[in-house]
């Protein structure tokens, strides 16, 4: 089982870290969540008996739940972040393209669904299952997310030409 754990860790470590970062927008918070997720996987060895795609779905769901728990924790509500600009430099683990900065500016619920759909290539049905939501709700969120992204990207484009 230790070999299987190492195989899964090697396969999905970047996926878990990217998802946590897309949710938290903080390198250190994402790393903490990343660590918690793999500790949970190590403790739940029975998960390793599943096929790799099922394990990945489990990891994504646990990562999302860890992110939610992180934002609900009393510790998180009491701290103040010193300088998020230095925190947000996870360029080695995140696919860089021209839309990613705009995706990261979306509100959390739009950002998460958009990230899972476009960057992790999950189908709407799979995202609905991961997030315990209806497929119709996920479709609605994706439509609204696309509208918000279009507005943001057109605004940036117009600002470049005017400035």
Image: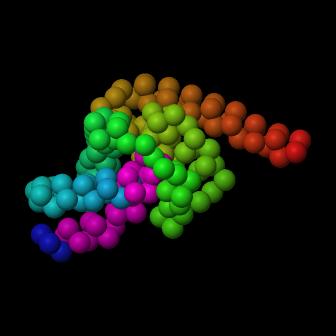
Residue found at x 14% / y 72%? 2
Q: Position of residue 131 (x, y in %)?
A: 33, 35
- Which residue is most to the right? 162
- Residue 13 is left or right of residue 98, and the answer is left
- Which residue is most to the bottom? 3
The answer to whether 36 is drawn above or below residue 147 in the figure is: below
Q: Quadrant of residue 74?
A: top left
Front residue of this view, candidates 7 and 155: 155
- Residue 128 is left or right of residue 156, and the answer is left
Q: Quadrant of residue 61?
A: top left
Q: Position of residue 98 (x, y in %)?
A: 66, 53
Q: Quadrant of the C terminus?
A: top right
Residue 50 can be seen in this image: no
Residue found at x 16% / y 61%? 42
Front residue of this view, candidates 23 and 80: 80
Q: Position of residue 146 (x, y in %)?
A: 60, 35
**Count of numbered circles in the view:** 0
Magenta span: 4-29
The answer to whether 132 is drawn above or below residue 61 in the figure is: above
- Residue 30 is left or right of residue 117, and the answer is left
Residue 112 lies within the magenta run: no
Residue 12 lies within the magenta run: yes
Q: Quadrant of the N terminus?
A: bottom left
Q: Position of residue 136 (x, y in %)?
A: 43, 25
């Amino acid at each position: 089982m230790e070999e299987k754990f190492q195989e899964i860790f090697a396969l999905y470590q970047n996926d878990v870290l990217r998802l946590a970062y897309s949710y938290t927008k903080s390198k250190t918070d994402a790393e903490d969540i990343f660590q918690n997720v793999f500790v949970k996987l190590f403790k739940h060895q029975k998960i390793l008996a599943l096929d790799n795609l099922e394990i990945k779905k489990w990891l994504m769901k646990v990562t999302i739940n860890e992110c939610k728990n992180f934002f609900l924790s009393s510790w998180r509500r009491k701290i103040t972040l010193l300088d998020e600009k230095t925190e947000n430099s996870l360029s080695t683990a995140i696919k860089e393209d021209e839309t990613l900065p705009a995706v990261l500016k979306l509100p959390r619920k739009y950002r998460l669904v958009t990230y899972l759909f476009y960057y992790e290539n999950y189908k709407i049905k799979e995202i609905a299952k991961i997030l315990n939501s209806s497929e119709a709700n996920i479709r609605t969120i994706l439509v609204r997310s696309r509208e918000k992204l279009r507005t943001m990207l057109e605004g940036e484009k117009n600002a470049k030409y005017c400035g």
